[in-house]
Structure formats: structure tokens, C-alpha cells
Image (cartoon, rainbow, N blue to C red):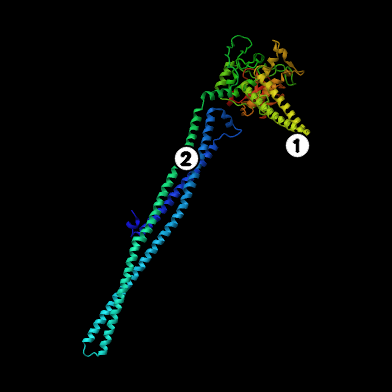
Amino acid sequence: MSWGTELWDQFDNLEKHTQWGIEFVERYNKFVKDRTDIEISYAKQLRNLSKKYQPKRNSKEEEEQRFTSCQAFLAVLNEMNDYAGQHEVIAENMSGLIFAELSRYIQELKQERKSHFQEGRRAQQHIESCWKQLEASKRRFERDCKEAERAQQHFEKMDNDLNVTKADVEKARQQAQTRHQMASDSKGEYSSVLQNFNKEQHEHYYTNIPNIFRKIQDLDERRIVKIGESMKTFSEVDRQVVPIIGKCLDGITKAAESIDEKHDTQLVVEAFKSGFEQPGDVEFEDFGQPMKRTVSESSLSNSRSDVKQETKGGKSKGKLWPFIKKNKLMSLLTSPHQPPPPPPSCSSPSAVPNGPQSPKQQKEPLSHRLNEFMTSKPKIHCFRSLKRGGSGPEDFSHLPPEQRRKKLQQKIDEFNKEIQKEIDQRDGLTKMKDVYIKNPQMGRPESVDPKLAEIEQTIEKLRQESQKFEAWLAEVEGRLPTKIDHPRRPSEMHELQSTSVNNCAQDRESPDGSYTEEQNQDPQLKVAAQSEFDDEFDDEETLTAIGTCKAMYPFEGQNEGTIAMVEGETLSVIEEDKGDGWTRVRRNEDEEGYVPTSYVEVYLDRNTKGT
């Protein structure tokens, strides 16, 4: 089937069809361009998504990478990054193999189509010119024939008229003959032009136009083939990256299968295990007998009086405090449970032997205090009088034993890495020095000595630091159980130092009758208490005052957790006496502590505690 024979008279329609064909190629090429832009944008968004959820350096997220689920998620993010790379490959191949190729082909197609239709128009103009020439010859022949006929009729009329002279008749005859000759010439010319036109027309419709239309048909067929090839390339570009995308998806599946819930739960144990044992049973305290209240071994007030036994055994026994909220625990820890000092007999001119006594406080059993601690809303304490010394001691003594052991082991590993790094550098310099000795022209051997000496000093310092941490690690593991892990209340420090049954013998009075406390308390206990108080309770909010009190006697408050006061001073009460003889007070919103209840006169707010 040929357009030259079937569509010989559809020049204008073919011109419109081929123009539509080129516009269709341009439309498809724009579609490829838009798909390329989508792939580039999609790849960019995937990369940004992967980057957004990557764990940040030196952050908590980086520590979470120990868990298999987090590691799997990181692998998924990496695979998504590779997945985005494959979409970039798709965009690049589509842009180079399809869009750029079709853009070039469209320009060539437009030029070729333009040349073919220009040739067709020239052929049409030629045949139209021949047709016009034929029409002009035909009209001339027709006119000459009519004039020859009229000249013949005029001659016959003149010849039959007797009144016309012979000369007029001869003239008419000659004119008729001339017209006949002109008609005969026009006929010959018309016949020649007609033959020539028929020849040109036959050549136009059977040779020129079919050839031109055949070229246009070939151009259009090549355009259609090109579209098909482009669509095939379109699919091949995607198919080429399918295996790699499949590997990315396989990597995501493998990462999901690598999640180990048992391993992750074990990591939680390792991360938060304190190393303490579960608390023991609280013993029954009989208050029915008229005797001094005896605190059970596993009670909260006595849990820190077992320090000597704990250090000997290497493990704590009967500790209940890890399960109590920090604010309640702090109140219990800091309340001085040693007996408060008796009021001085004559501490000031205004004092009388039978001076005013503090309001009687109802004794509450320990079980009632525990019940209050576990059921009431937490009160956050703030010890502003304790100055924060830093984030924590160097030996990590503020941490539970198990966490402390991990931190110490981590520091030892870091020191070992640094030592190995310095040793490698020393070995390299030693080899360089040997080369200089063998080949003096390359350098002076003594030039390396200062650096070697510096490295040796660094190695020695690192080893000393490592040995220090190893000693602390051995202490934690029970080889050197001499460290006290937790702070003690003033009363407990007093009990630890007491070797006599009679606790009163350990108390002394100053010359003026005021009460003084033991001065030979273990400094390690104070440092440990200071460190733990700093880390646990520095950032907690201040308690609300529930009343005021007036100091009836001076108090030095040298023990840990107590506060000094002078006679007549007014302080804010933030916690009542819980039956142990101590009241918690605050001075000027920046200093808190305990004072003996018998040394002050307490005035509680009615809206807080009643009368």
C-alpha cells in the first residue's frame, strides 16, 4: 500500500497528518522529560528521608544502635539510599537515551518533512503552470476559429453582393484566408500544448507525486518505529535496575530478619542493671512495750547502717530504697535519725531551766511513713546549700555497681586504644631512626629523640590512668571492696563510728551548753553523699513552706543535712517532724536543712496542716 497511488490527491491531508505525527513525538518526549523530573525528585526525597532518620553523631540515638532493631532500621535507611541511587540511574538513562535522542530526532524529522513538502508544492506549481498554458492556448484557438468563421461569412456575403466591387471582394477573401491560417496555427499550438500537458500531468501523478508521497510515507513510518523503540527503551531502563532494586529489597528483608528480640532485651538488662539485690522483708516493730523503738535491720532508716557488713560481704542486703521515688527517698535519707541534742540548760540570758519546749509531735511508726511515701504525690526537694561539683566523680562512684563497672571498662578500653596508637607511632619513629643511622644523608638520628621521649611520657601517663581505672574496676568487682556507694545520714554516720552501746557518750556539749556533733566522721562518706546528692537532686524543684518557726536556742548544724541557726532567727518550715525529733527548714529560699525540733517553736499554717 502506497500513499503515492492511494492518496495521490490528499496532499493537504498528508501535510496535516505528518504535522500531527511530529507533535505526538514532541508530546511523548515531554512525557519522558516529566518522568525524568519525577525520578530525580523522588530520588532526592528518598535521600533526604534517609538522611533525616540517620542517627546523629554524639547523641543518644548513636547509643541506641546497639539494639538489633535499630541496626536493622539503619540498614533499611542505607538500602533506601541505594534505592534512591537506582532511581537517579533511571532518570539519567531516560534523559540520555530517550529525551535527548528524541529531541535530536524531532529536529531532523521537521527538516526532512519540510523538504519533502516543498518538493511536492513545486511539482504542484509546475502542473498548475502547464494547465494554465493549456487553457491559454485553448482559448486562443477558440478565438481564432471564431474570427476565421466570421471572416468567411463576411467574404461570402461580399461575394454575393452585386454592388460590391471586385477589390472589396478580393480583400474580404484575403482576410478570410488569413483568419483561417491563424486558426490553423492556433490549433497546432493548442494540440502541441495539450500533448505536453498530458505528458507533464502523467509524469506528475504517476511519477513525481508518488515519489514524494513515498518519501513522506517512509518518514512517517520511521517516526512510528522511533516511537516504538523509545517506548521499548523506556521499559528497558526500568528493567535494568530491577535486579539492583531487588537486592535492595532483599537487604531490607535480611535486615528485618536479623532483629533478635532476646539480644535486645539482654542489652536492656546490661544497660540498666544496678547490681543491687531485691529488698528484704520489713520486720514487725512492736510499739506496745514501753521501750526505746528499735529499727529493723531492713527498714529504711537502718538500711545504711549496715555499711560495714555490706563492704565485708561485697553485696548490699535488704535494700528497699531503689524502688522508692527520689523525693521521698531524699527526705528519708537526709532526715537525721540520730537522737536530736537536748535543749541547752543555759544557752542565753533569756533561757530558763524550764523554758518553752517545742510542740509535741506524735510518733508515727515506720510502716505509716512508708505507706505515706508510696501513696502520696512526690515532693521534689532541692538542696541549694550543696554546691554541684560537676557531672560526676571521675571513678563513676555515683552510678550503681553494674553501670559503674561498664563505664570503668569502657574507659580502660579507650586508654588501651590510645596506648596502642602511641606505641605504633613510637615503632614508626624507631624504624625511621634506624634508617637515619644506616643512611645519615637522609637525616640526623638525634632529631627523632625528642619526639620519642614525648611519646614515652604520653604512654606512661596513659598507663598510669589505665591502672587507676583498673584499680577502681577491681574494687567494683569485689577484689577491693572498700568504697561506700551511697551517702549516709548524719545519724547513720554517727552509728557507724559508734563502738560503744551507750550512744550518749559520743555526744559532747560545748562550753556554753550548745550541742556539738562528732568531728571525726569519715571524709569518704561526705564525698560520696555530696556526689550522690549533687547528681540526683540538684535539678528538682523547691518544696512549699507549710509554716514558720523561731529559734529558741542557737544550733551550729555541723553534721551533714543540718543547718545552723542563731537564737531568735525565723525560718520557713517545709517539712514537719516525722517523729524522729528533727524539723526541716529553709532560710532565704537558698539554704535548707534539719534542726532539732526542741530548739524551735513551730507555727504551722492553718490552711496547710490545721491548728
Residue at x 40%, y 61% (from the top left corner): 119
* Residue with the mark numbered 1: 442
Q: Is residue 287 left or right of residue 13?
A: right
Q: 176 above or below 250?
A: below
**Total numbered badges shown on the rendered structure:** 2
Q: Is residue 412 left or right of residue 180?
A: right
Q: Return the mark for residue 240.
A: 2
Q: 5 above or below 225?
A: below
Q: 546 above or below 217?
A: above
Q: Nearer the viewer, residue 235 or 313?
A: 235
* Image-quadrant location for residue 533: top right
The amino acid type, in three-letter code, at marker 1 is Met
* Residue 248 x/y as whole percent: 49, 35
Q: Nearer the viewer, residue 10 or 254?
A: 10
Q: Nearer the viewer, residue 275 or 605?
A: 275
SS assignment at label 2: helix
Residue at x 39%, y 63% (from the top left corner): 121
Q: Is residue 202 left or right of residue 270?
A: left
The local crowd at label 2, few if under 14, some if 14 to 19, many if 20 or more residues have their Cα within 10 Å, is: few
The amino acid type, in three-letter code, at marker 2 is Gln
Q: Nearer the viewer, residue 525 or 288?
A: 525
